Image (cartoon, helix red, strand yellow):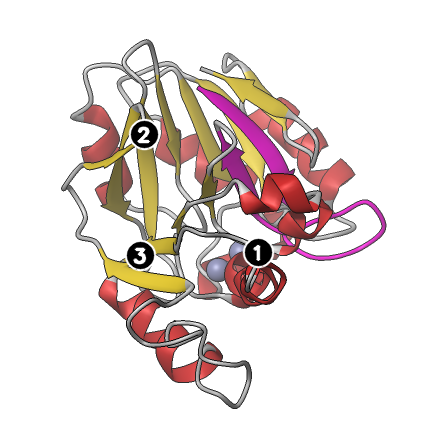
Amino acid sequence: MQIRILGCSGGIGPGLRTTSLLVDGHLLIDAGTGVGDLPATELAAIDTVLLTHAHLDHVCGLAFMADNLFGEIDHPLVVHAIPETLAVLRDHVFNWQLWPDFTALPDPEHPLVVLKSLSAGIGLRVGALTATAFRVSHTVPAVGYVLDAGAGVFAFTGDTSASERIWNALNALPRLDHLMIEVAFPNQEAELAERSRHYTPDVLRDDLAQLRHRPMLHLTHAKPGTEALIARQCAVALQGWQYRHLQAGDQIIV
Ligand SMILES: [Zn+2]
Ligand SMILES: [Zn+2]
């Protein structure tokens, strides 16, 4: 399994892109601003999208993708997400007001975008791998995903703060080789992190103590301008863990 990080920042700025991962060239996990860097041929190769939640930094690229791909591909773009996320897309994005309804274009029988509801805990076969959602704890209904390619297991939490649900789901796995997890705010902003349901380095350290696996950690979603401070705090908080701070352009090979 090859995972290309198209974006993983908590905001925009020079060289920064918001969350989007391209798996094996055809599966997109979240559609942040990172998808905007893909050449047309690579964009056209995407057939499946898994969304973690409806926040704009994770779905805005979907609107532009649909526009670019309209009339250019002969397969639908199948978007899987929990019902709460799909409802936001229907009501607030593809509603003919913020954006055309690409779930009914070019015609309702053969739409470009197909929205499919998924449930946490139920595996979804996507090409050679199985994707299983697990509930996390954010300000809106949200999930992370476990991707199992047979040879290795990768999990991505999406946006979340401390939650037993994450560790219950991950501890139930027979193995976990790579964990991509967010740490959006520095320790000084613990109150804001708690209110916006994101991790700080110290809260992440405490929560990771519940994990029975010892995966490589890939840290993401730092708010722009806080990267260096978060890195210094993680160097203290995550001693004993193998980890790195992800950037757009990085890859994870599982
Ligand atoms: Zn969010
Ligand atoms: Zn986010």
Q: Nearer the viewer, mark 3 or mark 2?
A: 2
What separation in Å lies between label 1 and label 3 (alpha carbons)? 24 Å
Cα separation, mark 3 vs mark 2, equals: 17 Å
- Return the x and y of residue 101 as percentages of the image width and height: 44, 79
The numbered mark at residue 72 is 1
Ligand 2 neighbours mark 1 (CB distance < 8 Å): no
Amino acid at the residue labelled 2: Gly
Reading the image, the residue beneath label 2 is: 127
Queried on whether the Cβ of the residue with tag 3 lies below 8 angstroms from ligand 1, the answer reads no
State the extent of the magenta-drawn residues as a range: 1-23
Residue drawn at x 38%, y 59% as measured from the top left: 138
The residue nearer to you, when weighing 155 against 33, is 33
State whether residue 210 appears in this view.
no
Q: Give the quarter of the figure containing the N terminus.
A: top left
Query: In the rendered structure, which disc, 2 or 1, sits on the residue that comes first in sequence?
Result: 1
What is the three-letter code of the residue carrying label 3? Ala
Quadrant into which the C terminus falls: top left
Cα distance between the residues tagged 2 and 1: 22 Å
For mark 3, what is the residue? Answer: 81
